[in-house]
């Protein structure tokens, strides 16, 4: 039994229309995704915008309704209605992409960070204030800033407040939805490193959603690549970066810039090969609708979406 | 397109049913019933009770409601106990008067709104625009009844340009030129008073619509292509801004209904609004109910027409 | 690593403190001369009518005095008397107070109902929203004036309070609709979504997270509604279906003008009330418009 197991997750958004507003069809945002995460590890979910990676994360935490499939967290099924409000919820938290809209502009830092604490724990005003100050210190902000408003902070600082809020209940799993993509490049590394520090300190598990392979390479132990709601490849960091099998993954990997001039010729060669392969054998990798096939094992850890041989 | 219209029609029926229920409830809350007004005190109370039973006045409310709606569908609006005549007959002449008042008001509303809106939008921030904006600013804040009173005082009493009451000079033969002319004269001041206030919304809408459209990319493109200024306005801007205005007239009906109550009362113009006020003061509740019902249906249909025209004009507008 | 991080962040904290909502409102009003004058006018007139009406004996003013019917303005009666020999000036003061009071009361009541209705409809969306909006559409389509008049005429134990209840029952829709469409946008923002993941209940999110973010819209709408409500009340009183007889309103004074004699020859009875209504409505609107600009950062003057 894994820590977090997602089995054949499907999230469809209905298309309404017609005379009486019937459901005419579905947008298959997430279309049969399965993966599992071990405790203490970071799992990267990569894909272009619209690939369904964010929807997957939001479905796990309950912000999007699950059409079918299962989400098991420490063996408990999160899809059943009952558990939606149960204490399992406090073990899973989320860090949002946009630090500007994810903090309520009308609330002081104290109220923002204390919100989850107030929902789950009964603390006196004094205890609560102390907790919030500790949390702020933990994320590297001055404890005196509890009476400030979000707009008095920079983007990176705001994201730290977001992290402080997410770890306030000592959760086990944090879903980080592009936590640094809205930040200046100069601040990105700071926030990422600090997320890793916190991970060690609190034994956190991350589901790290990103479109940036460079960031993912830095953060993640295992990686899943999504395309149009389906998985195209899954494996360890080594599997994905050193031995990409699917043409989509190869193209992503080929697109990572490398500043080392000694690799220039190699890189160029690799890119041209990938491009040629893409042009020649596109149909071997995608079905008639342009979607990925089911996953086949390449090794113990490595799965690739390829048509069944035969 | 037809989908939208059908869907819009589908929600109109529950609206009319709800309206009828509301009006029915009001009728039930009113003191007295069809009999209490016409009863001779000398009649034996037992006989009255029997009569009530026969007329179905003691039935449970839902049966009475069905009876009442059944009567309405056959055009039976009941009988006015003050005028001792069928409400339908009583309403007929008043309805015609109000209809003409409405037509004249709508005519003036657009007659004023379109040129003012265009001038103020096309040459915005000139002194002409400021004058028009000043007018809309005052017009917005002026309650209709105050404006109508002032109009009556100035043009009716002080300057004596217009008659100050009624819908026609008594003693003229219906159909003659004098009769029609007199009707028109009686109509003019109330209609103008209503229109001058009602038009303010439209002027403002048109102005901001034109000012907005002026800065849109497709207008800049049209200019860049070398279209003349008048062509830019006539072909591109006005077409975009004027069409929604046309659709507003359905909504204007709802506004007019409130307005007629004031204006007909102030100018003593015998239309539906005045009938409503007279009946409610005389406690002639059958008439009151009939007027509310008719005006309610008129506003429902007005909104329906506007929505349909709007959807024809602007495909973006859709209801869920 | 950690220490350098903190330092770096401290230096990037060059964000200036932006002013609070109340201060933005205040600054906009001060910039806009007309709004400032309007505000001062409103404060003065409110203080004046509420202050004076404490001293004035309302009973005496509304008592009929048959020896002083229709007197022109004099030293005793600054604005003359009405058909019952009652002092017009006193009625003007009390009428203004009553009109203001009921305007504020109705605005507050419609505000509360409209905000709660709009919050629920917009926040839950879907079928709830659909049904609630159909109900709202129905209320919106009713011939307001007539329905109110009928209810005023038939309601037993008619009083100022029942009158404001009746007005409220048919006036909450506008603000409800505005709030609803704003909430529809607001609830999709990450902060509201984040609250859900933090375990806050829907009611808590609606009232403690979303509500504080729509206060400026509520304040602006309610200010503009106040102007409209003063106008509506005086209109209803003018028709004789507003305040009960014993409680004069500005509309009551205007209703004397339905008598052609009064309209033509005794202007002092109705003109001051007309001017006062107009000024009140203009002033409230001016303040409201300035607040509206302040609430929308793109339109701010200051």
Image (cartoon, coloured by chain):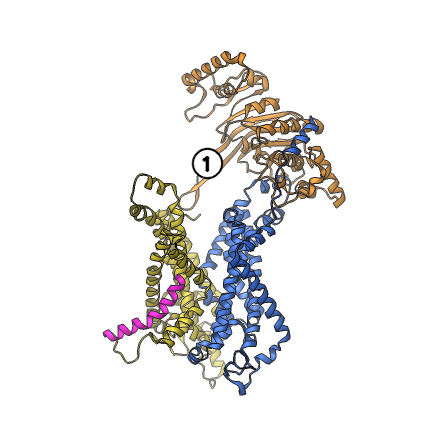
Chain colours: A orange, B yellow, C blue
Picture layout, residue B252 above or below residue A27: below
User: Which quadrant is home to the N terminus of chain C?
Assistant: top right
Residue pictured at 38% horizontal, 79% vertical? B84
Picture layout, residue C50 above or below residue B43: above
- The subunit carrying tag 1 is A
- Extreme-bottom residue of the structure: C67
Picture coordinates of residue B184 (x, y %)? Answer: 30, 71
Picture coordinates of residue A196 (x, y %)? Answer: 66, 26
Question: Is any atom of residue C117 visible in this view?
Answer: no
Secondary structure category for the residue under label 1: strand
Picture layout, residue B7 above or below residue B73: above
- Classify residue A18 as left or right of residue B176: right
Residue pictured at 57% horizontal, 82% vertical? C63
- Residue C12 is one of the magenta-drawn residues: no
Q: Nearer the viewer, residue B310 or B11?
A: B310
The magenta span reads: B175-198
Q: Nearer the viewer, residue B200 or A16?
A: B200
- Quadrant for residue C64, please give it: bottom right
Majority SS type along the magenta span: helix
Q: Which residue is mark 1?
A: A26
Question: Is any atom of residue B260 visible in this view?
Answer: yes
Picture layout, residue A23 above or below residue C172: above
- Residue B182 is one of the magenta-drawn residues: yes
- Classify residue A122 as left or right of residue B4: right
């Amino acid at each position: 039994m894994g820590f977090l197991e997602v089995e054949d997750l499907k999230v469809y958004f209905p298309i309404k229309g017609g005379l009486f507003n019937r459901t005419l069809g579905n947008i298959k945002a997430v279309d049969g995704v399965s993966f599992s995460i071990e405790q203490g590890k970071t799992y990267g979910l990569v894909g272009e915008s619209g690939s369904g990676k964010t929807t997957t994360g939001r479905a796990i935490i309950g912000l999007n309704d699950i059409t079918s499939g299962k989400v098991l967290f420490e063996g408990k099924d999160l899809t059943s209605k009952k558990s939606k409000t149960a204490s399992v919820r406090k073990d899973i938290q989320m860090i949002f992409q946009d630090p500007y809209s994810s903090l309520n502009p009308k609330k002081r830092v104290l109220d923002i960070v204390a919100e989850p604490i107030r929902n789950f724990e009964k603390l006196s005003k004094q205890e609560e204030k102390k907790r919030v100050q500790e949390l702020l210190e933990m994320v590297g902000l001055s404890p005196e800033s509890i009476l400030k408003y979000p707009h008095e902070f920079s983007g990176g600082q705001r994201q730290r407040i977001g992290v402080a809020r997410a770890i306030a209940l000592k959760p086990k799993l944090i879903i980080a939805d592009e936590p640094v993509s809205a930040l200046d490049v100069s601040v990105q590394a700071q926030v990422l490193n600090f997320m890793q520090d916190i991970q060690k300190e609190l034994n956190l598990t991350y589901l790290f959603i990103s479109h940036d392979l460079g960031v993912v390479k830095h953060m993640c132990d295992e990686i899943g690549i999504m395309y149009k709601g389906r998985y195209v490849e899954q494996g360890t960091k080594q599997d994905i970066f050193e031995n990409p099998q699917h043409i989509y993954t190869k193209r992503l990997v080929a697109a990572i810039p490398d500043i080392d001039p000694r690799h220039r010729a190699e890189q160029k060669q690799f890119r041209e090969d990938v491009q040629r392969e893409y042009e020649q054998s596109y149909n071997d990798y995608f079905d008639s609708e342009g979607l990925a096939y089911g996953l086949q094992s390449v090794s113990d850890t490595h799965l690739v979406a390829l048509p069944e041989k035969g | 397109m037809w989908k939208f219209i059908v869907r819009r029609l589908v929600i109109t029926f529950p609206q009319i049913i709800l309206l009828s229920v509301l009006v029915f409830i009001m009728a039930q809350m009113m003191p007295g019933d069809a009999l209490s007004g016409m009863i001779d005190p000398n009649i034996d109370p037992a006989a009255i009770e029997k009569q009530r039973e026969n007329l179905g006045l003691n039935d449970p409310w839902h049966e009475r409601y069905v009876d009442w709606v059944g009567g309405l569908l056959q055009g039976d609006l009941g009988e006015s106990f003050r005028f001792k005549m069928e409400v339908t007959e009583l309403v007929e002449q008043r309805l015609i008067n109000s209809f003409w008042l409405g037509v004249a008001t709508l005519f003036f509303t657009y007659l004023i709104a379109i040129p003012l809106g265009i001038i103020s939008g096309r040459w915005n921030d000139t002194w002409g625009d400021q004058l028009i904006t000043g007018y809309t600013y005052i017009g917005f804040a002026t309650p209709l009844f105050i404006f109508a009173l002032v109009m009556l005082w100035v043009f009716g009493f002080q300057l004596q340009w217009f008659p100050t009451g009624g819908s026609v000079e008594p003693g003229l033969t219906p159909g003659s030129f004098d009769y029609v002319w007199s009707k028109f004269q009686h109509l003019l001041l109330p209609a103008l008073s209503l229109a001058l206030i009602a038009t303010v919304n439209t002027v403002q809408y048109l102005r901001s619509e034109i000012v907005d459209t002026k800065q849109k990319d497709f207008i800049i493109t049209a200019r860049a292509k070398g279209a003349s200024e008048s062509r830019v306005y006539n072909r591109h801007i006005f077409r975009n801004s004027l069409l929604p205005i046309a659709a507003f007239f359905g909504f204007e009906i709802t506004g007019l209904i409130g307005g007629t109550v004031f204006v007909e009362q102030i100018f003593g113009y015998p239309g539906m609004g005045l009938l409503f006020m007279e009946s409610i003061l005389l406690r002639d509740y059958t008439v009151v109910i009939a007027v509310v019902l008719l005006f309610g249906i008129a506003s429902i249909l007005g909104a329906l027409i506007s929505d349909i025209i709007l959807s024809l004009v602007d495909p973006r507008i859709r209801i869920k | 690593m950690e220490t350098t991080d903190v330092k770096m962040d401290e230096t990037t904290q060059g964000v200036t403190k932006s002013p609070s909502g109340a201060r933005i409102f205040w600054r906009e009003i001060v910039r806009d001369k007309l709004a400032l004058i309007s505000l001062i006018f409103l404060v003065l007139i409110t203080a004046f009518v509420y202050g004076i009406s404490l001293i004035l004996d309302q009973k005496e003013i509304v008592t009929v005095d048959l020896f002083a019917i229709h007197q022109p303005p004099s030293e005793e009666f600054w604005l003359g008397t009405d058909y019952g020999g009652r002092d017009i000036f006193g009625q003007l003061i009390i009428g203004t107070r009553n009109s203001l009071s009921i305007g504020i009361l109705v605005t507050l009541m419609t505000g509360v109902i409209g905000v709660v209705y709009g919050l629920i409809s917009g926040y839950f969306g879907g079928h709830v929203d659909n049904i609630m909006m159909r109900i709202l559409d129905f209320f919106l389509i009713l011939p307001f004036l007539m329905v109110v008049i009928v209810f005023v005429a038939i309601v037993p134990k008619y009083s100022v309070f029942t009158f404001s209840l009746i007005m409220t029952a048919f006036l909450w829709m506008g603000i409800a609709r505005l709030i609803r469409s704003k909430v529809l946008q607001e609830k999709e923002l990450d902060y509201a979504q984040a609250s859900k993941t933090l375990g806050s209940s829907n009611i808590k999110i609606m009232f403690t997270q979303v509500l504080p973010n729509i206060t400026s819209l509520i304040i602006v709408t309610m200010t503009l509604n106040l102007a409209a409500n003063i106008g509506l009340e005086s209109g209803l009183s003018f028709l004789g279906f507003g305040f009960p007889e014993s409680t004069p309103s500005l509309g009551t004074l205007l209703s004397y003008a339905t008598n052609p004699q009064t309209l033509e020859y005794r202007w002092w009875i109705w003109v001051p009330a007309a001017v006062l209504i107009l000024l009140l409505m203009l002033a409230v609107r001016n303040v409201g418009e300035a607040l509206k600009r302040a609430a929308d950062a793109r339109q701010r003057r200051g």
